[in-house]
Amino acid sequence: MAVFNYKALGKDGVVSNGEITATDRPDAIRILSQRGLQPVNIKEVSNSKSVDKGESSTKRPPTKGSNKAVGKTTKDIARDTNGLLRLKRAEVVLFTEELSEMLGAGLQLEPALKSMEMREELGSLKDVSREVRQYVRDGNSFSNALRKVSDSFGPLYCSLAAAGEASGALDTILKRQAHYLKTLQELQSKVTLALIYPAFLMVAGVGVGIIFVTKLIPQLTGLISSTPGGKVPFAARILIGVSDFFHQWWLVILLVIVGGALVFKAWKDAESNRLTWDRTKLKLPLVGAVIESRFYVQFLETLSNLVGNGLPLLRALELSRDATQNLYIKEHMDKVIEMVGDGRSFSRALISSGIFPPLLIDMVSVGEKTGKIDESLRRAANRYDTELGNSLARVMQLIMPIMLIIMALLIGTMLFLMFTVILQTVQNLGGR
């Protein structure tokens, strides 16, 4: 028999520590599950000689057979260069929804993953559930298991999962994350549909322009040039000059555009420039308001869940900060945490940070005075969720007019030049 130190999460969200005697690690996990505890960390502290003598394979849990099963079922699943699973956004959303519903129904994490693993209709998500469950059974936290299985979940997702584990509200946070991912998916679909018509206009306009510049205009100018005393119109010279320029330098222009895009990507991805880029994103027209509103919703929802489930405010702020990906906002969150840690009120700390709007601060202040800060945070989250929806709607409403205006200017300018050429050509021929 072996003795294990364990850290486990109970059904009520309380974290407990202790020792347990079991034959091996999987047996310890089974005993804890029977007690209604979800293992977070299990470490072997001692082992008897008889066990060492009779069973030399207990240093690691006997998951060899299950690993074979995983290898057999996941060999055709797409993986990146690091061997991690690659998932589509729709698959991440489905995994999150299914798991949050099972946890909300009262299942523990490991049985919920086991149930998803056995469901045929989930397809490739069965393999995700299997691998995550293996890591959880080995004593890893759920958030750490997600990081080891797939990069498709992302740092934000894993940070929120860690916050949910710490607060005992994993099902609630996963449900909100599923809503957020579905919102992004719907927004992407709406943007794609909204851009189809302008894209068609752009392709048609460019096609017509190419035909005019390469066929019609050269024929007209050739006719004018062959006429004694005929002069090529100024508009025609502009179109032909532009056409010749792109014909001669198109490869250089393409390389410059691609090179500029790569340089910009390298610049914004550099660790030294991330703070500047994150600050710039918040100032972009339309997009900045959406990013800002999304942060408020995520911050308020996460914080209200953590505080509502009994976590101290300072620890809840630290977890909320870890779930924030914008470095500029995270820098201000550090100041808020430092001030709250020094004994200042939460609302005063938010005022001093300089990035939170007065309405949000007022709602937090009311919660502090009434002693119901979690309810105030949830009301503020709902308000800014509505504001986020309005910001997204404004972006969608402005995409089509902006694209149509740009296309009208481009095509209108081209048509004006081409018709000017035709009229001047007709006038020159008529004068002859």
Image (cartoon, rainbow, N blue to C red):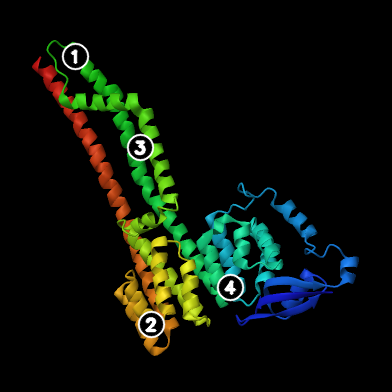
- Determine the image quadrant of residue 432: top left
**What residue did someone put label 4 on?**
165
Label 4, residues with CA under 10 Å away: few <14, some 14-19, many ≥20: many
Residue 141 versus residue 50: which sits nearer the camera?
A: 50
Residue 417 versus residue 305: which sits nearer the camera?
A: 305
- Determine the image quadrant of residue 153: bottom right
The amino acid marked with disc number 2 is Ser
Residue 102 versus residue 263: which sits nearer the camera?
A: 263
> Residue 65, percent across and down?
80, 58
> Residue 211, percent across and down?
31, 27
Labels 2 & 1 near each other (Cβ < 8 A): no
Nearest to N terminus: mark 1 or mark 4 = 4
Kind of element beneath mark 1 = helix
Kind of element beneath mark 4 = helix
The answer to whether any part of residue 120 appears in the image is no
**What residue did someone put label 2 on?**
345
Label 4 to label 3, Cα distance in Å? 51 Å
Q: Which mark is residue 203?
A: 3
Kind of element beneath mark 3 = helix
Label 1 to label 3, Cα distance in Å? 32 Å
The amino acid marked with disc number 1 is Ser
**What residue did someone put label 1 on?**
225
* Residue 13 left/right relative to 54: left
Label 2 to label 1, Cα distance in Å? 82 Å
Residue that appears at 36% across and 41% down: 200
